[in-house]
Image (cartoon, rainbow, N blue to C red):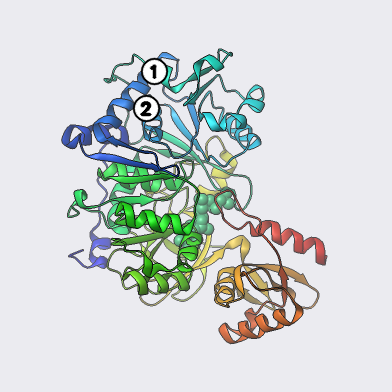
Amino acid sequence: MGVDYDTIVEEFEWNIPESYTVTSTVADHAASFGDRVAVHFLSDDGHREERTYADLRDGMNQFANGLEELGVGKGDRTMHLLPRHPDTFVIQLGALATGSLLVPCSSMLRAKDIEFRANDCNATTIVVHESLTDMVEPVLEETPLERVIVLEGDEDALDDDRWTTFQSVMDGQSTDYDGPDLAAEDPMSINYTSGTTGQPKPVLHKHRWQYCFNQINAPYWWGVDEDTDLEEELLWATTGTGWAKWFWSPIGVGLTTGATQLIYDGDFEPETFLQILEDEGVTKLCAVPTQYRMFANADLDDYDVQLNDTLSAGEPLNREPIERIQDAWGVTPRDGYGQTETVALVTNYPGIDVKTGSMGKPTPGVGATIIEVDEEEEVETGEIGEIAVPVDSPAIFDGYYEKPELDEQKLSGEYYRTGDLASQDEDGYFFFEGRADDIIISSGYRIGPFEVEDALVSHDAVAEAAAVDSPHDERGSVVKTYVILAEGYEGSDDLKVELQEFMKEETAPYKYPRRIEFVDELPKTSSGKIRRVELRQQEQEKHS
Ligand code: ATP
Ligand code: MG
């Protein structure tokens, strides 16, 4: 980045082309460099496939024609339940090209989750991989779904009229598609939030969302801008197809910039992933903190990687993996922050002097700031407040799908409030404090769970920890931590005392956990986020 970042932020101007859509962008890429590989697919059984930009365009058009023939059109809701697959993009782009609203579902969801989503957004079509049909069939009658398209399905095995296969939808269709005119301000997708704090919420996005990723996430997080030689890069975002992160990175950065990306279908195993980084020559990796933490426990020096960027998002990134990866590979994991409702709001942009524990600085054009929890005033430097974005920022969502009460609650003021707390230091760096709901107030002190957990996991005995507020007669509440021990350690009262003493050294003593419980697992969302809300409930029940 030649120009200094503050100047970029100051001079940034939005110039969103009225007709922008990701589908037309992919068609443009196909016209300019159709033989460039868009998807470099690899699965855990060694299967490889490639899709060029021309393949994506042709497949998208065929699938759109097929969907249209089935009666899918503008404004309909089309769900998908897909693993990472060479045809995932074709399915997503084809559905978008018809003007239907895409409703991505994580392949980890269960039948009741599909039932909830299909009813909540009144979906009429679902595309499901053959291996996941058990998540649809038992609840189909309870939903408005009219048709089910099975990827890798066997037509002869389907006896109900509602069921068909991806292949038969594609067969005989033209690779030209004359669909509806779509524009940046047309609705594009309904992305459900992770459900960390409650019921998942249906976030409505317009096509503009993808343009914002191209303008913000690509240059100011992934380090992909007009000076990047895309022929030299291989991007890998490890996310699943149903999460907002899939739209942030594989689509929002990979497809919108015309990059080549790796899609790997296989479970996370640190050694396997590290070997893939080396073997495939990945240059930019985007993973989640749990994955970086597990990498940090492996022998990183054994892997000869070509990474020039490592990105992290979704949860706070601890100090330990940042330092380990820096030491081993000379590349600094750069955290970025945002939500299903937004683009990247705060990032450690390329070239920033990373301060460990900070999620970076506000991205250009977006306007993220920190305001008082009860008012719309910006807080002073160093004070904790809620991360907020002006409601008229193009980088946020278009409301929750048919949820006027939620919209009223979240979007009726001057700011969209994220529900996340942070403070800013004198250099403008943001420090995440936790979700407003997760903050622990003990003897009048406000304690963010992350700082407790971060300190605790730096003890050798601790593999993972979750801190919550636990009711206490005198103090109102105290810090309680649930701890998963590292291999080779056993829980005991002595170990509790040792951890408490350790914490008094590591953090301000009022933050030390007065209550500790050793557990084998923590309640998590299917995307792997700790559901502190459940632990809090347990504490309420135990101590009230
Ligand atoms: P729900 O809204 O249903 O409770 P969710 O908020 O977890 O679920 P997502 O939109 O997937 O759903 O996650 C966004 C949240 O993840 C943010 O609001 C924030 O709490 C957390 N988050 C994302 N990136 C970071 C980061 N870099 N550091 C800390 N927290 C992060
Ligand atoms: Mg949320």
Q: Which residue is mark 2?
A: 94
Q: Quadrant of residue 258?
A: top left
Q: Is residue 443 above or below residue 342?
A: below
Q: Quadrant of residue 275 in the image?
A: bottom left
In the image, 142 versus 434, the foreground residue is: 142
Q: Is residue 130 visible?
A: yes
Distance from mark 2 CB to nearest ligand 1 atom below 8 Å = no
Q: Position of residue 494 (x, y in %)?
A: 73, 82
Number of numbered tags placed on the structure image = 2
Q: Residue at x 47, y 59 (%)?
A: 270
| Mark 1, residue position | 66
Q: Quadrant of the C terminus?
A: bottom right
Q: Secondary structure at mark 2?
A: helix
Q: Residues within 10 Å of mark 1 (few under 14, many from 20)?
A: many
51 shown above or below 345? above
Residue 376 shows up from this direction: no
Residue 512, image x, y percentages: 65, 80
